[in-house]
Image (tube, grey):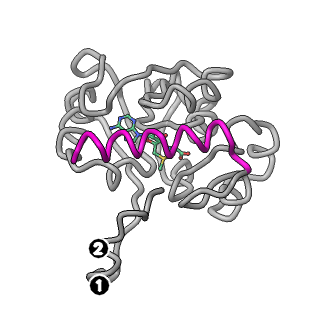
Amino acid sequence: MNSELRAGVREAYSRVALKPFEQHPFPAGAALAESLGYARELVIDHPLAADAFVGVSCLPGFVEVDSGMRVLDVGCGAGLDALAIGPRVRGIIGLDFSAEMLARASAQLDVVQAAAERMPFADACFDAALANGIFNLNPRREEIFAEMARVLRPGGRAWGAELILKGALDEEARSDASWFA
Ligand SMILES: C[S@@+](CC[C@H](N)C(=O)[O-])C[C@H]1O[C@@H](n2cnc3c(N)ncnc32)[C@H](O)[C@@H]1O
């Protein structure tokens, strides 16, 4: 089940990267980014990233970074957050398991294709990390938290954005197998 879910998640986001203007089971694109608070100039300047944006919040508005920091964007997708934060830091790397998403991000960013549960980085090599919308997609999210803690230096900082339920889902919604198709 976990591997099926994982493959489904990867395919769903890869489809957005390949066909951003088609209908998807979740909101996507430049209009979503602007509605969440991303600057219009950023969106216009970076159409490859903005067209396939699928984050859940304007995370760059919350992160506190400085010009000395090495930063990791976990589940970077097409890279809009990393492009927004990049000019404010020493370096930023995006990690994602979707090659199609990374094909967009890699036009302007350093990226690594890998699973967030097993990051190919040394211990304590980043000063800060962010994750915009990755946790709910992963039943093994504790491993992602653990990996973020491992690759951050002691005292390093992390920011995450995620959707939350305000109440329990009813049985019909809980058993809807098509929610991500
Ligand atoms: C909700 S999207 C957000 C993308 C990006 N942060 C943004 O704001 O547009 C989640 C991203 O995480 C990636 N992802 C999901 N689970 C992952 C995992 N276990 N390892 C690596 N990437 C993952 C997906 O491919 C997708 O690009």
Callout 2: helix, strand or loop? Answer: helix
> Which residue is rendered at x = 82% and y = 44% of the image?
44
> Which residue is rendered at x = 80% and y = 46% of the image?
41
**Residue 171 at x, y = what percent?**
26, 82
- The stretch in magenta equals 1-21
How many numbered circles are shown?
2
Q: Amino acid at mark 2?
A: Arg
Residue 20 magenta-drawn? yes
Q: CA distance from mark 1 to mark 2?
A: 6 Å
Residue wearing tag 2 = 174
In the rendered image, the vertical position of residue 21 relative to residue 177, given as above or below: above
Q: Which numbered dot is residue 27?
A: none
Mark 1 neighbour density, 10 Å: few (under 14) some (14–19) many (20 or more):
few
Residue wearing tag 1 = 170
Mark 2 neighbour density, 10 Å: few (under 14) some (14–19) many (20 or more):
few
Q: Amino acid at mark 1?
A: Asp
**Residue 19 at x, y = what percent?**
68, 42
**Residue 145 at x, y = what percent?**
23, 42
Quadrant assignment, res 87: top right
In the rendered image, the vertical position of residue 151 relative to residue 85, given as above or below: above
Principal secondary structure, stretch drawn in magenta? helix
